[in-house]
Amino acid sequence: MGELFRHLLLAFEEAEQAEKEGTYPIGAVIADGRGQIVSRGRNRVFSEGDCTAHAEVDAIRGAGSLLISMSARRIVPNEYTLYSTCEPCPMCACTILMSGIKRVVWAANDDRVGAIRRMKQGPHFIERFDTITYVAAPYLELENRQRAMMAKWCTSRGLPEDEWKPLTVGVANARSWT
């Protein structure tokens, strides 16, 4: 089992906790350049009544002291990777950008509100988003796991789960861009 898979499984632990807390089942972790987890986060929108409490933002907040030099009043250059169970939304994509994190890996693409792929296509802030690399949905098994969790969440709220149907592709649809 490779590092990507292991770190995505840790993000799923957070997603499962978010699900138990009655909110969107999305989780995230941040690893340093050596692969050590430095922060964990999960969606807390409905558990905390905060529409900005997304998993990626929660993880970034947890790593705040590592990302910011308070004495120099600067974002610290870093080699962190953020792993999420779902493609980050526009708010999270911009938070990742502003935190200086340079690599993002997610288990499931989000064609409705996922933003990293769109932001890298421009035209807004394209020169900034070009500094971020990503690996999109490297494992079909994990993508379908996230899709099942999101479909269950949508159904429990009386919403259609059409966009979260499982994928039946024979191989993982991993995409990696710089």
Image (cartoon, rainbow, N blue to C red):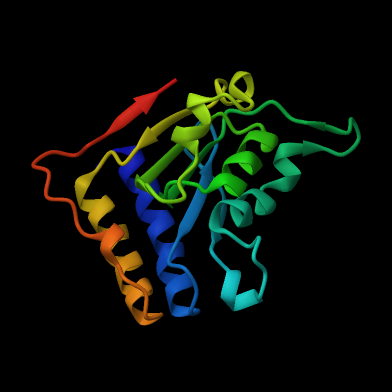
Quick one: quadrant of the C terminus?
Answer: top left
Q: Is residue 96 above or below residue 26?
A: above
How many dots with numbers? 0
Q: Is residue 77 left or right of residue 160?
A: right
Residue, x 66% and y 60% (percent of image)? Answer: 52
Q: Residue furthest left?
A: 170
User: Residue 36: percent from the left, percent from the top?
Assistant: 50, 41
**13 over 71 or under it: above or below:** below
The answer to which image quadrant residue 174 occupies is top left
Q: Nearer the viewer, residue 175 or 142?
A: 175
Q: Estimate the x, y position of residue 1 in percent, counting from the top left.
A: 24, 42
| Residue 106, x across and y down, in percent | 40, 44
Residue 146 versus residue 6 in the image, above or below = below
Q: Residue at coordinates 50% horizontally, 50% vertically from top-left?
A: 29
In the rendered structure, the answer to whether residue 20 lies left or right of residue 131 reads: left
- Within the image, what quadrant is residue 122 found in? top right
**Where is residue 156, by image quadrant?**
bottom left
User: Which residue is pictured at 67% across the width and 69% down the height?
Assistant: 50
Task: Decide if residue 82 is on the left or right side of residue 61.
Answer: left
The residue positioned 37% from the left and 80% from the top of the image is 158
